[in-house]
Image (cartoon, rainbow, N blue to C red):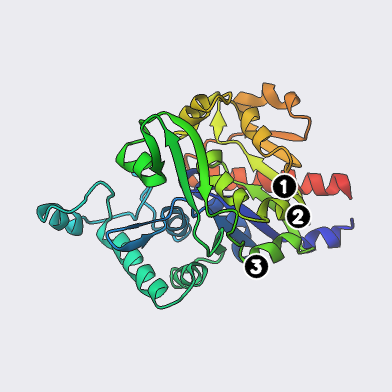
Amino acid sequence: MSAADNLCKRRVVALCGGIGGAKLALGLSRLLGGDLMVVVNTGDDFDHLGLAISPDLDTVMYTLAGLDDPQRGWGRRDETWTFMAALAALGGETWFALGDGDLATHVERTRRRAAGETLSAVTADFCRRLGIAARVLPMSDDGVRTRLRTDAGWLDFQDYFVRRRCAPRVLEVTYDGAASARPHADVLAALADPRLRAVVICPSNPFLSIEPILAVAGLREAIAHAAAPVTAVSPIIGARAVKGPTAKMMSELGVEVSATAVARRYRDLLDGYVLDRADAGEAAELGIPVTAAHTLMASLTDREELARQVLASADALTKATA
């Protein structure tokens, strides 16, 4: 491949969940701008208080717009909670917190969905109004719901994750509706585009954030045949998850808590893998090119630097196969 051909390969598709994935998506967006497409998990979506809630989409959207709350990791910064206080006084359900600014997103999304707009169309307009250059798309406009079989019975995702604070033991994870859900046509087109530079699987929980995306009918196959290398970033550092229940779930489901165990779940897709330097000793087990990097994204500089290394890894894979 000539240098000119390589320069034409600009577009990147990133698969992303919530907080951890959104950090890398931000780093990528600062390097790529409008050449980035972020495909976001919607298995967490649910209806609450009559509103259509899309937690991962909103986390990604707020993060890319610079509106995210760095302390909580979710919702909007400088949030107020008048609505929740008033709801509590009336005896309403308060286990899922909705800040006043965040509430406006859900109300407007619900209104527009009821009027017939697709989730992707509403999200695109929100992103435009918030000045986000990257293309942010739900994994499907069709409903998919992540459900967990636990020692407390079958639970919807938000019941497990928020109401019960991930306490029940997880025995099985399913993605209801995924087999009949359709990927967005623009996602399939981007994956097949000769100008595609890389597909990046962000460091998100494999069971709750990435595998719901891969379960959407035809999407895993489209990624496997993408016009560019597929690289994943490990959400595990030194046998521990950076945030959330990833390590707990892996252990409960009988999966080794390690960076290599996550890679094996995507093994049919991966051309390369990025793991933390603390786990560099595991690299030889995978049999694919591995990059050891600093994957704990504590600062904006960390996010941009990891994004650079992920893209450099993908470019090296392209060059090696040219």
The mark found on residue 199 in the picture is none
Q: Which residue is mark 2?
A: 226
Query: Residue 200, how many percent across, how many down?
Result: 65, 49
| Marker count (numbered) | 3
Work out how far the residue at label 3 is from the one at label 1, CA to CA, in angstroms: 18 Å
Query: Considering only order in the chain, which callout, 3 or 2, is on the residue closer to the N terminus?
Result: 3
Q: Residue at x 19, y 55 (%)?
A: 84
SS at mark 1?
A: strand
Residue 205 visible in the picture: no
Query: Residue 96, how many percent across, how many down?
Result: 28, 49
Work out how far the residue at label 2 is from the one at label 3, CA to CA, in angstroms: 13 Å
The mark found on residue 230 in the picture is 1
The mark found on residue 186 in the picture is 3
Q: Residues within 10 Å of mark 3 (few under 14, many from 20)?
A: few
Q: Is residue 158 left or right of residue 297?
A: left
- Residue type at mark 3? Asp
- Residue type at mark 2? Ala
Q: Residues within 10 Å of mark 1 (few under 14, many from 20)?
A: many
Residues at discs 1 and 2 in contact (Cβ within 8 Å): yes
Farthest residue to the front: give it: 153
Query: Considering only order in the chain, which callout, 1 or 3, is on the residue closer to the N terminus?
Result: 3
- Residue type at mark 1? Val
Query: Residue 163, how many percent across, how many down?
Result: 30, 41
SS at mark 3?
A: helix
Q: Is residue 197 above or below residue 319?
A: below
